[in-house]
Image: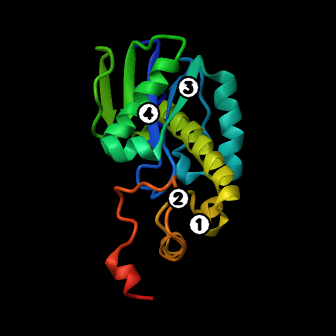
Amino acid sequence: MKKKYSQYKFEAALDEVGRGCLAGPVVAAAVILPEDFFNEEINDSKQLSEKKRKELDSIIRQNAIDYAIAEVSPQKIDEINILNASFLAMHLALEQLKITPEFLLIDGNKFLEYKNIPHCCAIKGDANFMNIAAASILAKNYRDILMENFHEDYPVYSWKSNKGYPTIAHRKAILKYGITSLHRKTFKLFPEQLSLNF
């Protein structure tokens, strides 16, 4: 895994989580790591156990030159669509950084330019660049905690385990109990094929 993409000292890596969820915000993290920092355990957050993600989250926060995490609400997602909401979450994270990045490295294949800072998109970047993987860990941990907290208010949707993703249990709960203010109303919450199978 490469540490970073560019030769710039202050390269901010960005990743988001929660795009495919039926409920909850989309969350993005921006991370600037020191050039001499390397941790071989850092990997795409989806490949790590919850315990390992939490351990690495603490290490990343302690060692990063700068980092920030931002979220965009389900209501805003419904208003501007999930792609634009993902861009907005990334921009909001960048705005929180104390250091102005010289270069941006984004996980994925699309990005909306930010303040004329040069950038590069990297498909599967969280599996190939350590700084993007670090951003993915911070974003996932932050969002998982949010959804676990929301679960206490709405336990019937099993958000503690599914984190708002479209599992069968989550869809069945929507059909049985309806939706909450945390559900994304523009998403396909009631698929015909599932409701017909009951």
Cβ–Cβ under 8 Å for marks 2 and 3: no
* Residue corresponding to mark 2: 180
Mark linked to residue 68: 3
Q: Is residue 30 above or below residue 27?
A: above
Q: Is residue 165 above or below residue 45?
A: below
Q: CA distance from mark 2 to mark 4?
A: 22 Å
**Considering only order in the chain, which callout, 3 or 2, is on the residue closer to the N terminus?**
3
| Mark 2 vs mark 4: in front | 2
Type of amino acid under label 1: Tyr
Q: Quadrant of residue 158?
A: bottom right
Q: Quadrant of residue 187?
A: bottom left
Residue 114: percent from the left, percent from the top? Answer: 33, 20
Front position in the image: 66 or 159? 159
Q: CA distance from mark 4 to mark 3?
A: 11 Å
**Considering only order in the chain, which callout, 4 or 2, is on the residue closer to the N terminus?**
4
* Residue corresponding to mark 1: 157
Type of amino acid under label 4: Ala
Q: CA distance from mark 1 to mark 2?
A: 10 Å
**Considering only order in the chain, which callout, 1 or 3, is on the residue closer to the N terminus?**
3
| Residue at 63% from the left image edge and 69% from the top image edge | 156
| Mark 3 vs mark 1: in front | 1
